[in-house]
Amino acid sequence: MTLDAYAAELRLVDHHVHGAFAAAPDRAGFEEAFRELLHEASRDAVAVKTVAAYRAGLDLDWSAPEPAAVRAAAGRWLAEAEPRPRLCDPVLLRHGVHCAVERGLPIQVHTGFGDRDLDLHRANPLLLTGLLRQPAVAAVPVMLLHCYPFHREAGYLAQAFDQVYCDVGLAVNHVGARATAVVAESMELAPFAKLLYSSDAWGPAELHFLGAALWRRATAAAVQAWVDAGDWSEPDARRVVRMIGRENALRAYRL
């Protein structure tokens, strides 16, 4: 089972969050109630997650919203007629992310390639630069998930910000024979201590197996080519693969 299975996915899950607050007599309490709900839901988690990229894009003003703005946005969202309205309000998404920062767990952020309801140009991890510069965020590991085709941009962020990590798990499952090239490109700038293995698997056990097998094959081919060219020593190659495949995650997720 991958770390993804243990992460409390802070997807701002529409039906769960909406149901928790829609019947509340005092909707002005949304701001603090959400914090409490997040703490309770993540009590045994090793990480939280946001899919703000799907709901509003990452090109947001990433400052923490004022309490009055959160209350007003919550009132509008809770009043919507749909039984489970999508939580797309940028103010509430920002509030959720800043609550996650306060929670102190590693924060997984979906970036790059995704389903058709995502605007890819708004999922570039470089759009998170303003968030990553904030002192409170500097104290929390930020895990940039998937990243492709912005894996080089993600590598820059991992190099520039101490708290940033990245992976290309989703891409490996989609690019086929080019997986070796994508894995190699992900290592161009990102420090080896900031790269993470990911299967991007969910559901059937076969997906976890295939994700791991494809990553191992692509990674082995990339580093073996560097060893054969004399650019890396074999001990260094083995050490880097161990770091990416296991050790970095143990450290970043504080396991």
Image (cartoon, rainbow, N blue to C red):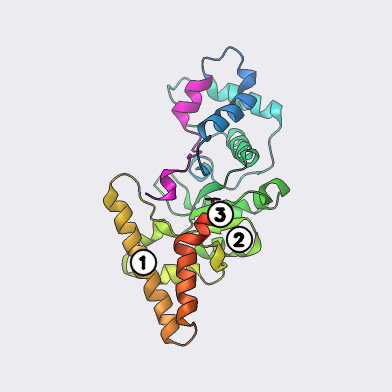
Q: Looking at the image, which residue sits at the far front?
A: 255
Residue 80 seen from this side: no
Q: For the point 34% across and 58% down, which residue is it?
A: 211
Q: Nearer the viewer, residue 220 or 171?
A: 220
| Real-space CA distance between mark 2 and mark 1, rounded to the nearest whole angstrom | 24 Å
The answer to whether residue 114 is magenta is: no
Total labels: the figure holds 3
The answer to whether residue 12 is magenta is: yes
Write down the quadrant of residue 192 in the picture: bottom right
Q: What percent of the width, then of the height, locates residue 71?
A: 65, 24
Q: Secondary structure at mark 3?
A: helix
Q: Which residue is mark 3?
A: 252
Going by the numbered disc 2, the residue's amino acid type is Leu
Q: For the point 37% across and 62% down, which residue is it?
A: 172
Q: Is residue 233 left or right of residue 203?
A: right
Count neighbours of disc 1 (C-alpha within 10 A) and say few if under 14, some if 14 to 19, many if 20 or more.
Answer: some
Q: What percent of the width, then of the height, locates residue 67?
A: 70, 28
Over which residues does the magenta segment extend?
A: 1-21
Going by the numbered disc 3, the residue's amino acid type is Ala
| Real-space CA distance between mark 3 and mark 1, rounded to the nearest whole angstrom | 21 Å
| Real-space CA distance between mark 3 and mark 2, rounded to the nearest whole angstrom | 16 Å
Question: Which dot marks residue 216?
Answer: 1
Q: Which residue is mark 2?
A: 157
